[in-house]
Image (cartoon, rainbow, N blue to C red):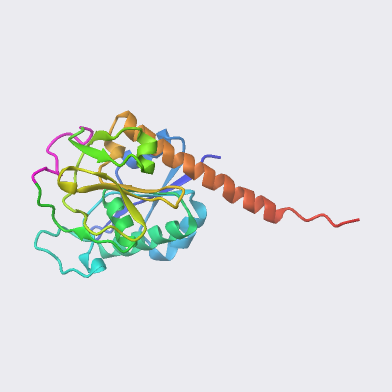
Amino acid sequence: MKPIIGITGNFDLEENLYFLAESYPASIIRAGAAAIILPPEERLVNDYIKNCHGILLSGGGDIDPAYWNEPPSWALGNINPRRDRFEIQLARKCLDLGLPLFGICRGCQILNVAMGGSLIQDIRSRLSHQQKAPRNYAFHDIFIDEDSYLFKILGKPTIKVNSFHHQAIKKVGTQLTVSARAEENIIEAVELRDHPFAIGVQWHPECMEDANAVSLFKAFVEQAAIYQHRLYSKITTSRTPSREKS
């Protein structure tokens, strides 16, 4: 059976509508897993965890700065308290259980906030991080730490990525390590080293059509498959009756 990846969905507060861009499940399916969309329901977090072998935190709007004790800036975009609470709780559960976790754009920021970090509410830098170009277009360079798991996956010290964010990581969360930066030290990726797969990237690989995006999703799905195998091995072992000594 293919590993199951749960992808966090967005929620429109005015329309009462769950939604998710098709590119997320499409990328997971191409990498060899099955994809399901997770509505942001806090009461279902444990059920999601029990039925998924990996969690993908998708992109979306801004995160409430109350989580790192800052007042909201005038530049803060729309926030969704329901989604914030749900995804932070879900991320912490994944980290505690060793469940593979992949954060994309907002998902990278959720991973950081869940670990006690903070965000820049609105980037002020020479380099634009909100491209006016097709979503699959590689827009600017990032520089990858050669000691990182991200480098092990991609095998390159520098790659070009797309960019659609105005927030970024400021204070790095406890136990997280920065694995990539852009110009002016804007953080582009973080990871938890003592974990099978806990990586957050600030760009949108689900929209890219290059080998780097393929490698990221493949590595994530491979770790989900390992988690699935270990999980089922434990279940099988617990159900096997012990033989009595004659």
Residue at screen point 43% across, 57% down: 95
Residue 46 visible in the current orientation: yes
Query: Is residue 237 shown left or right of residue 88?
Result: right
Residue found at x 20% / y 43%: 182
Q: Is residue 49 left or right of residue 241?
A: left
* Quarter of image, res 72: bottom left
69 or 5: nearer the viewer: 69
Q: How many marks?
A: 0
Q: Residue at x 25, y 51 (%)?
A: 60
The image position of residue 134, as x and y in percent, is: 18, 34
Q: Position of residue 66 (x, y in %)?
A: 22, 69
Looking at the figure, which quarter contains the C terminus?
bottom right
Quarter of the figure with the N terminus: top right
Q: Of 151 and 39, which appears nearest the observer?
A: 151
The answer to whether residue 35 is magenta is no
The spot of residue 222 in percent (x, y) is 48, 39
Residue 190: percent from left, percent from top: 31, 49
Residue 135: quadrant of the picture: top left
Dominant secondary-structure state across the stretch colored magenta: loop
207 w.r.t. 91: above or below: above
| Residue at screen point 24% across, 67% down | 68
The reply to whether the magenta stretch includes residue 128 is yes
Residue furthest to the right: 246
Rendered position, 96 above or below 24: below
Position of 183 with respect to 233 (left or right) is left
Tell me the magenta residue range.
Answer: 126-137
Answer yes or no: is residue 14 visible.
Answer: no
Side of 242 relative to 72 (left or right): right
